[in-house]
Amino acid sequence: MNGADRCFTGDGMMAADDARRALIEAAVPLTEFERVHLTAALGRVLASDVTSPLDVPGHDNSAMDGYAVRAADTGEGGALLPVSQRIAAGHPGGPLAPGTAARIFTGAPMPEGADAVVMQEEVEVDGERIRIGRRVESGENVRPRANDVARGDVVLRAGERLRPQMIGLLASLGIPEVEVVRRLRVALLNTGDEIIEPGLPLAEGQIYNSNRYTLTAALQQLGCEVVDPGPVEDTLEATRAALREAAAQADLVVTSGGVSVGEEDHIRAAVEAEGELALWRVRMKPGKPLAFGRVGDTPFIGLPGNPVSVFVTLCLFGVPFIRIAEGRRVAFPEPMRARLAHAVEKPLKRREFIRVRLEHQADDLPRAVPFPRQGSDVLSSTVWADGILEIPEGMTYPEGTALNFWSFESLLQ
Ligand code: AMP
Ligand code: MG
């Protein structure tokens, strides 16, 4: 947190990139690991590099249904070769007698001596013999040993989050279990006396608690275990007690709401009493207030209350911290580029992260079309949009300017 102080400028606000960097630097990777079977490994973070114990495939094999031959035996075309054996996948044959062909099927091991496979569509069968109309080159339709992976190759690195294709690759190497990082336990607290749970009737002045559900789902998608003791009453004592209890049970405490300076905002005072707080005003829209610190020894991230701000600040600041704490190698995804569909004629005071949909264009970057209502309370904008476009402050931009875009998918994986 200390280094972050240097990032403030004259207006007392911190640049969004500096805030992210400070959070990433403060995150400490979990060092508790567990072994899981491949069937339970999806979305888990690898704790150590995986080295292949074998060559895959383990032998040269046929890429086609056809006939294995010595290419030299096919001459300049028109060769007539007797079929000396039949080799199916899982049933290796013997060495190939010179001047003969072996009937062979996809994936079956090449017989010793053969160096090419002729597709069955290309031969004429004549009783026990085949005629090959053309000259065949050595290596045709043969998948060489270790074509996919060689023994000793590092196939996956520590810090990778396991995707289905990675799990398949591990299985292809004969590896049944992997060592993964324990799930990060995140305690979630929602503040606000006006919020009420879906399913209950809404009284005058109440709104449904959406942040709890947005955050729970996002954290689950990130592979976290969510601890949720329920919403917190807007009093200092209740907030302090809830924070203490949350910190005792979790690796990270995340709150929504109550971080501004209103009389009903108790997060600030409660965290100061229970630990240490840095309240950052980040030069961005939506968002702005972002709290960070610790409750006891447990790291704490205080997100704003407005539903869009919650979602965007979680994506841009919470997730990078969480990824590092989960033991992942990459904290934040690389942006794509997309073209502004409108002009920004007056320089912005704060960096804007607008919800946009991408329109694909032939032979050009996609166009980023903004949702018409960009208010921080307009949650439907996050459903309509594909992701967020970053419009840096301090400059004007003609329509068509290429800027950074992140899909929600890339931010929340
Ligand atoms: P606050 O920072 O607590 O002043 O909250 C800012 C705005 O976000 C207010 O309009 C709150 O009603 C709204 N808000 C706070 N928490 C939630 C929540 N859990 N779900 C939906 N809206 C919320
Ligand atoms: Mg509030």
Image (cartoon, rainbow, N blue to C red):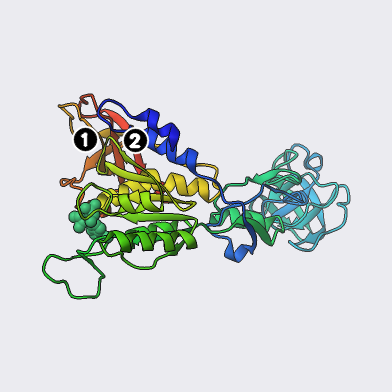
Report the residue that reaches farthest toward the left: 204
Count residues near mark 1 (Cα–Cα under 10 Å), then give few for <14, some for 14-19, many for 20+.
Answer: some
- What percent of the width, then of the height, locates residue 163? 54, 54
Look at the numbered disc 2 and give the secondary structure of its residue: helix
Residue 217 seen anywhere in this rendered image of the structure: no
Residue under the image location 78 percent in, 44 percent down: 115
Which image quarter: residue 9? top left
> Is residue 100 found left or right of 331 in the rendered image?
right
| Distance CA(mark 2)–CA(mark 1) | 23 Å
Depth order, front residue of 102/163: 163
Residue under the image location 20 percent in, 30 percent down: 348
| Circle 1 residue | 341
Look at the numbered disc 1 and give the secondary structure of its residue: loop
Name the mark nearer the viewer: 2 or 1: 2
Residue under the image location 39 percent in, 55 percent down: 254
Which label number is shown at residue 16? 2
Depth order, front residue of 92/35: 35
> Ligand 2 shows up in which quadrant of the image?
bottom left
* Ligand 1 neighbours mark 1 (CB distance < 8 Å): no
